[in-house]
Image (cartoon, rainbow, N blue to C red):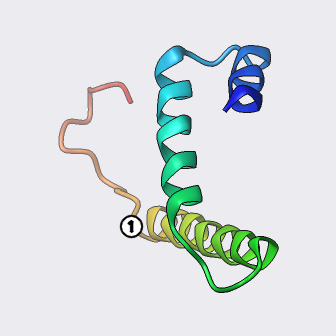
Amino acid sequence: MLHLGLISFVLRLEKVGYSYASITLAIIVMIPRAETPWIAAAHRFAKVSLGILVALAVVAVWREERRLFDNTPA
């Protein structure tokens, strides 16, 4: 947790971000896994990356071409 706090301090993240990161780290560390940590980390990275790519693809395809009000600035 100390390393996470130092990283948050160096990157000038807010304290809320540090608390969310701490909660996420605790959840990830507490879940027992049968595989090695590096394999679990690689799988998690692949899943999150795939989720981001799918979200970006959905946003690119499902772009709203017409606005309801033409005079409204974006």
Q: Nearer the viewer, residue 33 or 10?
A: 33
Which structural element holds mark 1? loop
- Label 1 CA crowd tier, 10 Å (few <14, some 14–19, many 20+): few
Task: Count the marks.
Answer: 1
Image location of residue 51, percent across then percent down: 54, 70
Provide the residue designation for mark 1: 62
x%, y% of residue 56?
55, 63
Tell me: 9 left or right of 68.
right
Q: Nearer the viewer, residue 67 or 29?
A: 29
Query: Quarter of the image holding residue 65?
Result: bottom left
Position in image of residue 6 (x %, y %): 76, 21
Front-lying residue, 70 or 5: 5
In this rendering, would 65 be left or right of 55?
left
Hey, what amino acid is under mark 1?
Trp
Q: Is residue 10 above or below residue 3?
A: above
Q: Is residue 52 above or below residue 2?
A: below
Residue 61 screen position, x and y as percent: 46, 71
Q: Quick one: which residue is furthest to the left in this view?
A: 68
- Quadrant (top left, top right, bottom left, bottom right) of the N terminus: top right
- The residue depicted at 80 percent of the width and 16 percent of the height is 10
On screen, 62 above or below 13? below
Residue 29 appears in which quarter of the rendering? bottom right
Q: Quadrant of residue 62?
A: bottom left
Q: In this rendering, is residue 35 above or below 62?
A: below
Residue at 45% over, 70% down: 58
The residue positioned 38% from the left and 30% from the top of the image is 74
